[in-house]
Image (cartoon, rainbow, N blue to C red):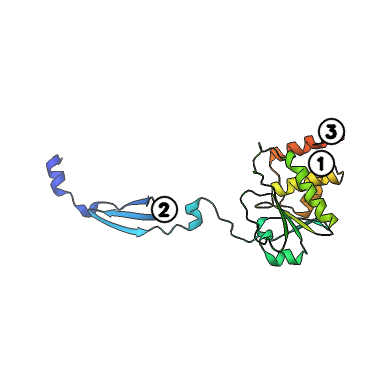
Amino acid sequence: MQSLTEEIQSFSRTRLRKQCTRVTSLSGRRIIETWKGSTITVVEDPVPQERMLGYVPDTSWDVQVGIVKPFLLLGSQDAAHDFGTLRKHKITHILNVAFGVENVFPDLFIYKTVSILDHPDTDLLPHIQDCCDFIQQACSEKGVVLVHCNAGVSRAPAVVIGYLMSCDGQSFDAALSLVKSARPASLPNPGFLEQLRSYKTSTMNGSKH
């Protein structure tokens, strides 16, 4: 049996296994450090960008516009920022219910901005009448209004549902069904849906918001 001294003397660095370590710098740069004995090799980590982020970024341009009524359209900020889409649908009025989204054609369209946070605790109902008035204005001027938020998924559909209930006399279920039929991506957050359900109940009981 070899003594510890003899084992140390007979040890060869060439018998060491490679050790690889992935390192992410503060700047987000990823590298692979490979040790073999006392030698280190550093190379870039070829991990795809989407894996580094932990999700696949959606960079597609969403200009799909849902036609709820001939004068009432629903979409995302992409549609609101695409001049060709606006002209194609003969849009004259734009209701922006996003937060921090610019109105990019102020000299060409009639805008109204009602900044609403897309959060279940946001009080949606106080904004409904203001939005309804603008939509009614567009209708009375024989215009076409586009209601949009950021993604056209939660806030804008919620406002349109509120309009259909308040000004068109539709039930919550009928309004939701019409909006989802016009724009299948529509999915107001749970807080908005609960408020709109209670709005239906209050309206039926003769209370106005």
Q: Name above or below for residue 193 compared with residue 14.
A: above
Q: Are marks 3 and 1 in contact (CB under 8 Å)?
A: no
Residue at (62, 53) in percent of width and height? 101
Q: Is mark 2 on a helix, strand or loop?
A: loop
Q: Which of 46 and 181 is in front in this view?
A: 181
Q: Name above or below for residue 112 compared with residue 81.
A: above
Which is closer to the viewer, label 2 or label 3?
Answer: 3
Q: Residue 207 carries which label?
A: 3
Specify the amino acid type for callout 2.
Gly
Query: What residue is disc 1 on?
Result: 172
Q: Residue 118 carries which label?
A: none
Mark 2 packing: few (<14 Cα in 10 Å), some, or many (20+)?
few
Q: Quadrant location of the C terminus?
A: top right
Q: Do the residues labelled 2 and 3 touch (CB within 8 Å)?
A: no
State the image quarter where residue 108 is shown: bottom right
Residue 60 in the image, given as x and y percentages of width and height? 62, 61
Mark 3 packing: few (<14 Cα in 10 Å), some, or many (20+)?
few
Q: Name above or below for residue 81 compared with residue 127.
A: below
Q: Which of 137 and 55 is in front in this view?
A: 137
